[in-house]
Image: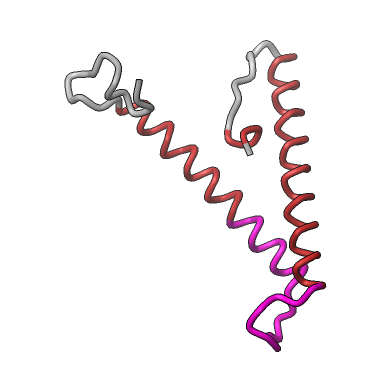
Amino acid sequence: MSFLGRGSAPSAGGINHERVDMATQELDMITDIFNRLVSSCHAKCISSRYAEGDLNKGESVCIDRCVSKFFEVNKKVGEKMQAVGAAAGGGATPGAFTSL
C-alpha cells in the first residue's frame, strides 16, 4: 500500500489527492522545524565572524547540545498537545512533532 494511494483502490485520477495534501503539509511542517532549528542553534553556537572553515570543538559541542535540547522540547510540547487534545475529546492524532 503506497502512501500516496497507488497500492490501494485508486480514485478516478489514480492518485489520492487528500494523501498528497497531507504529505505536503507534513513536509512543510518538518521543513519549518528544521529551519527554526538551524536558525536557533546557528545564532546561539556559531560566531558571526568565521575564522575557520570547519566547526571548532566548542561550536560542535554547542550544536550537539542545542539540537538535542530542541528535539527534547519539541517532543515534550507534542506530548502535551496530544494530552490536551485527548482531554478535550479530540482524540489526538500523531503528527510530525512526535515522530521526530
In the displayed orientation, state which residue is furthest to the bottom.
Answer: 51
Viewer-side residue, 8 vs 26: 8
Is 65 left, or right, of 11 in this rendering? right
Query: Residue 3, percent across and down?
Result: 38, 27
- Queried whether the magenta region covers residue 44, the answer comes back as yes
Q: In which quarter of the image is the C terminus?
A: top right
Query: Residue 56, percent across and down?
Result: 75, 77
Magenta extent: 35-57
Q: In which quarter of the image is residue 44?
A: bottom right
Viewer-side residue, 97 vs 54: 54
Q: In which quarter of the image is the N terminus?
A: top left
Is 13 left, or right, of 69 in this rendering? left
Position of 63 relative to 56 (above/below): above
Question: Which residue corresponds to the image point at 34% horizontal and 25% vertical from the top-left?
Answer: 2
Position of 37 relative to 91 (above/below): below
Query: Residue 72, percent across and down?
Result: 77, 42
- Queried whether the magenta region covers residue 53, the answer comes back as yes
Q: In which quarter of the image is residue 74?
A: top right
Position of 83 relative to 20 (above/below): above
- Give the image's coloring scheme: secondary structure
In the displayed orientation, state which residue is furthest to the top.
Answer: 89
Question: Which residue corresponds to the image point at 43% horizontal and 31% vertical from the top-left?
Answer: 22
Query: Residue 28, percent across and down?
Result: 48, 45
Q: How many labels does the image show?
A: 0
Question: Which residue corresponds to the image point at 75% horizontal and 21% vertical from the top-left?
Answer: 83
Viewer-side residue, 50 vs 12: 50
Viewer-side residue, 4 vs 17: 4
Question: Which residue corresponds to the image point at 64% horizontal and 61% vertical from the top-left?
Answer: 38
Is 75 left, or right, of 2 in this rendering? right
